[in-house]
Amino acid sequence: MIFAVPRRLALSLIALCLASGAASANEEHHAGGELEQARSIVHNLLKDNQSYVKGHKAAYFAPIIKGQQPRATIVTCSDSRVHTHALDKTPDGDLFMVRDIGNQLATAEGSVEYGVRHLHTPVLMFIGHSSCGAVKAAMGDTSKLEPAIRKELDTLKVAGGNADDDKAVMANVQSNVNKQVDAALAKFADAVKAGTLTVVGAVYDFRNDYKQGNGRLVLVNVNGATDAAAIKAAPVMRH
């Protein structure tokens, strides 16, 4: 039996099919665009790595092939604007890098402990940075974020406030660095007391908030001392 479809309904069905087809085409186009972008990124990384290989012969890697003896354990934020080239011209074998959101001890404790206890780095440095997204997020409501992200932000104790206020954000960035130093001083008190470990807090200031130049690494804490004069007088700062 064939049923007659009202003209209005037929037109609606046709419009729906056309819309569905257009949506599907748009999704495929969008997916194709993302795939092309991903392909470009991967190829670029491989190309840059090839340049690195050409510029670094076997002799460059010889000292680090059988083991590592880094100078410092560095805890930085995962932020893409913070990288080793700003800290060390030749970071290979020099820095034991630990990265997490908010440059925290609590969410990377095992990695930090490995650097201090097993690699015996004489310096443990926590580096915050300008415009830290983790700090901004922790200043506000995190309830709508994914559980795993919220869990890491929960250990980031900062004052609430307006995340659009640059001064408030920078105050929290520095406060967070000081809290990480305090936590490390408590955890590694024996090593600090023995003089085998110095815990340092710093801010990588690419915004030039401290007015010392864009990209400056500004020391804000040495073994709990936060006063500029006390930092300058710390044994680790003497030549």
Image (spheres, rainbow, N blue to C red):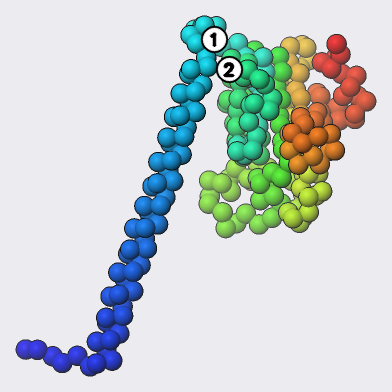
- The residue at 60%/38% (across/down) is 80
Mark 2 surroundings: few (<14), some (14-19) or many (≥20) residues within 10 A: some
* Quadrant housing the N terminus: bottom left
> Residue 77 — which label?
none
- Which quarter of the picture shows residue 205? top right
- The residue at 76%/47% (across/down) is 169
| Image location (x, y in percent) of residue 132 | 69, 43
Q: Which residue is tagged 1?
A: 60
Residue 86 or 160: which is nearer the viewer? 86
Q: Which residue is tagged 2?
A: 92
- Between the C-alphas of marks 1 and 2, the distance is 9 Å
- The residue at 28%/91% (across/down) is 8
Residue 32 or 3: which is nearer the viewer? 32
**CB atoms at circles 1 and 2 under 8 Å apart?**
yes
| Image location (x, y in percent) of residue 155 | 65, 42
37 to 217, vertically: above or below: below
- The residue at 24%/87% (across/down) is 10
* Quadrant housing the C terminus: top right
